[in-house]
Amino acid sequence: VLSLPPACSPHSVRCENCGRPHLHGHPTRSAVEPAWSQVPLSTDDLLCLEDGSLTLPFEDLGTHQVEPQLLDAALLEEQGQEEEEEVAAAAAAAAAVAAAPAKGRGKRAKKAGLRLTSAQAENAAKVKKAELDKLAREMQLKTSLRAFIEVCVQANLLDQALSSLHFHRNRAKEQNKGIAVVDVKVFNSLLRGFSAKGKLGRVQELLRTMEHDGVRPDAQSYAALLEAHARQPNLARDEVDGVLRQMAGQGLTPEDLFRGCKFLGDQRERVLKAIHAVLPDFEPAPPKFPTEYVCPLLERLGQQEKAHEAFSGEVVSLASLRSSAGEQLSWEVQGQVEVHSVAARLTQPSERVLFLRKQIEANEAAWRVRLKDAFVQNLKALYSHSYMNRGMSLYPYLSVLAPEVYVNIIIQEMRGLAMSSETFSPALSILHQGLGAKVMTRYVTAVKEHTGIAAKVTLLYEKYLEYYLSPELRERHSAREYWQKLKAEHSAGPSLDSDIALWPYHTLLGVGRFLYDIMIHEAKIDINVLRHSSSTKRMIPAFYNIYRTVGARTKEEIKPHPLLSKLYRGGAQEQLSFDVGLVPMVCPPLPWSCVNSGVFLLTQTPFVRLPEAAQQQKLVLESTPVEQLYPSFDALNILALCPWRINKPVLDLVVEVFLNKGSQELDIPMPPSECPAAPKFQTGMTKLEKAKVSRERMVLKRKRAEMYSLWCDALYKLSIANHFKDRVFWFPHNMDFRGRVYPCPPHFNHLGSDVVRGILLFARGEPLGERGLDWLKVHLINLTGLKKREPASERLKFANEMLPEILDSADNPMTGRRWWASSE
């Protein structure tokens, strides 16, 4: 039975009983005579794609035969004998479907249908692409509008947020294919902002708007309404009672507000105050978290007989951990960690180095003034533009933090660019997105400070440290379970797992582009900056744009001026700055308990590493019941709880070799100064000889750049290791889309090179066991590659034979007999 959708134009329906035609807007039932049509079908006609061809499915619909008015008998005559045979076959199939029992009709119905022409198939593909594009635009608008409104709330720009919401609502009504704002989270973000200010009229107006647009309020919406009532000078008991009755009409109870809502600041207490005006005896139940794994294969893992002790003896004390937690919290608030460079201790700095360092300090001080003035001036221009434009703009994102914060981020970006490679630079979009992401990270941290989340994390984390050092508690609870227990016992105040809307990709690009434009136009450098005595100044741009061809594509890049690169490299800065997420933690990471909260105390880290385009995977992850993710959470938490420390003798040896121009034998990079000098052009050379010299110079230039990149990578790793050499630290973990787990700090971790692994030690040692020493010997021979084709027994035998040489290298690694030098 062929069914055309109800949205089609009216059809000519011929009754099977009387044979008279009737016009029906909605077809009912028939055994249809399929026909070829050269007329493109409408959007709603193109329903499915089956076996490479588009078909209209047959459905069980009634007792009438449907013939679309657009089909004409003349069209059938023009199709030819072959088409008539196909039509007859399709008609027979349709009749067979109509006569078949309902039970077996489904599968056969899928194969029968109206075969479309190539033009109609192409049109159908365009229709489906248009539908997917519209869905993508809807998702992008919801994400962008929600993030924009939340930033406006934090920047105290509520009127601008409301204006933007109404702008997009009206535009959807004015355009036939406009995108309607029907996401309740968008309205809730604005409701929360108005309720925090006590603007009850605005809250009620927004709720009426939601009712007009067909957006059903949820528990978070009613919580904002009750909060607004509670912030009034005179709490109206009758109005609160009306709100509770309205909630009951939608199947919501006061208990649902505290079970499903996320609170910020004192919102929870305000909502409870409003409810107490009507229900004085009401007390919300503490939150409950599922405790059992949903996978039967993992049930026995909860029956742990003895917990692993984190430390033995007085390796670390509770007071020491609390002090380290305060230091970690201050790092995350600042967003940066200052690390002393190991290259700065090579020798006493020369006069030249000291002069260049003073030049760097003077230039950065001048840049700060110019960048701040330019930022404020450009922000005023952006405000004037956003005032005239009712839609979304970048102004709230660039005014939510203090101007000094943006200037500091620009200065840090300039340092990174000045120290970057000469032969490679990321694409401009990558640089813009990265700079915008740094601003967003500072924003999320500031929101957690402002809304009380940081204070509550500090309170609960002190209790969590007691669990960490208590074997008895670790036997009864996993890290996740104990953290959830603490959250249930301290449910008052803000919610720790509040969903702060992250900025969409195009917003990150816009923010980064705005800051980069200021940097390029305002950062100037004196052309005589490297000269000791120069009476004249000539300012030139410190950065410039270049266009580099990669394959068949040309991309725009930003490069520092060579003078700027020489200034920073020659200055040999004593301090290196790292984002707080790029270094280990000095206190145990927070346990993962949901996809939005874990590891760092304030800095938000993704549970799964996904590219920006993987929006569908992110939605699936957020919609997955949290108890299904418990095994993954617990696996990451166990890895993160392992404490580490530095093997000081090995670190000192590696740093010594690194500062003494490296070693190819030990895979320690050599500085670029060790690269051979480039050949020079000589007079009288032929064209072939000049071409050969040019190629050699290009190869050496590329090699020098590679050596510098490797040298900088080793410098970062060794400097971070040297920074943590006298303390215990931890590696927070997350996973990628395949389920593989990785430490969050990328430079220095236990999954790095053999040099880095040799520097690391477990903070708490374990007994080797009966054959542990033998396995260490086998592993040592494995590293040399000398017995790669021999069994483990032969490798152990060889290790015992070489034991005197091994001990000699352990006592005198660089001055002994160096038996390992001939290994792979």
Image (cartoon, grey):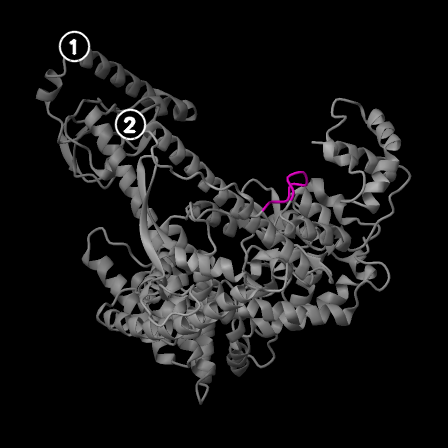
Does the magenta segment cover residue 696?
no
Q: Nearer the viewer, residue 462 or 315?
A: 315
| Residue 57 screen position, x and y as percent | 31, 29
- Counting labels gives 2
**Mark 2 element type:** strand
Q: Which mark is residue 81?
A: 1
Q: Is residue 132 above or below residue 430?
A: above
Residue 231 falls left or right of residue 461: left
The residue mark sitting in front, 2 or 1, is 2
Q: Report whether residue 384 is seen.
A: yes
Percent of width and height locating residue 404: 43, 74
Give the magenta-colored segment's residue range.
663-670
Q: Which residue is mark 2?
A: 54
Quick one: label 1, few (<14), some, or many (20+) residues within 10 Å?
few
Q: Position of residue 173 (x, y in %)?
A: 22, 59
Q: Could you give the CA–CA distance between mark 2 and mark 1, rounded to whole angstroms?
A: 22 Å
